[in-house]
Amino acid sequence: MTSMNWPNRDRVGNKARAYSASEHSEIHWAPITFGPHKGKTLPQVFFADPDYFIRMHDEGRFSGRLSNDAECIYERATRIRPPGKDPRLWEFAIIAEIESQQFRRLVIIKKGRTLAKLKDQSPALEIQSRCAVLDAIAARRIAGRSKAGREKFDKSLRRRLLGETSTVSNRLACEAYFDDDSNFAY
């Protein structure tokens, strides 16, 4: 883990004191004590039910330690790097249908690669967007004009980041993903 500053779990006014990565390694994600995801941690909720996580975050419904955990996850979700790839050579690509502009899938491709070189490509598909650093919150809102589009994006994101497609994501895998500084651009 690289040494970077983490948002503090203890806020002072509207400003968060930063922890170093070594200080953070001793802090564990707090489980939710209410609602449909009671007992889960916010990294699990982000991958399992992003609609719920984003709505609760945007409405300021998480309080105390959960509020700080949510801020950390939300911030990191806006700066995702291609996992295990050199960011100078690889990028995310959002694939959509040409006519309807509906989201089809999220892929990680070499920079400059065209759609014609992608496996399982269809003439009705195009690369709608490319980025070296993925803002999953914004991309999800664009991809998910419909609930079905958001669900496809979420499944594609889980597959690319965790290697899973199930909405029941492994707690340790979800937490480890958000704990690993190398997954995010700074």
Image (cartoon, rainbow, N blue to C red):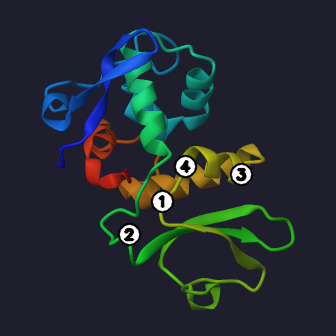
Q: Which mark is residue 142?
A: 3
Amino acid marked by disc 1 = Val
Pointer 1 residue: 133
Distance from disc 2 to disc 3, alpha carbons, whole Å, reads 23 Å
Q: Nearer the viewer, mark 4 or mark 1?
A: 1
Disc 2: CA contacts within 10 A as few (<14), some (14-19) or many (>=20): some
- The residue under the point 13% across, 35% down is 22
Amino acid marked by disc 2 = Pro
- Under circle 2, the secondary element is loop
Q: Which mark is residue 136?
A: 4
Distance from disc 4 to disc 3, alpha carbons, whole Å, reads 10 Å
Distance from disc 1 to disc 3, alpha carbons, whole Å, reads 16 Å
- The residue under the point 40% across, 78% down is 89
Mark 4 vs 2, N-terminal side: 2
Instruction: Say whether residue 145 is left or right of residue 42.
Output: right
- The residue under the point 61% across, 65% down is 105
Mark 2 vs 1, N-terminal side: 2
> From what the image shows, is residue 147 above or below residue 95?
above
Q: Residue furthest right?
A: 99
The percent position of residue 152, horizontal first and vertical second, equals 63, 54
Pointer 2 residue: 87
Quarter of the image for residue 130 reads bottom right
Instruction: Say whether residue 143 is left or right of residue 56.
Output: right
Residue 95 or residue 33, whichever sits in front = 95
Asked if disc 2 and disc 1 are in contact, CB closer than 8 Å, the reply is yes
- Under circle 4, the secondary element is helix
Disc 4: CA contacts within 10 A as few (<14), some (14-19) or many (>=20): some
Q: Nearer the viewer, mark 4 or mark 2?
A: 2
The percent position of residue 163, horizontal first and vertical second, equals 37, 58
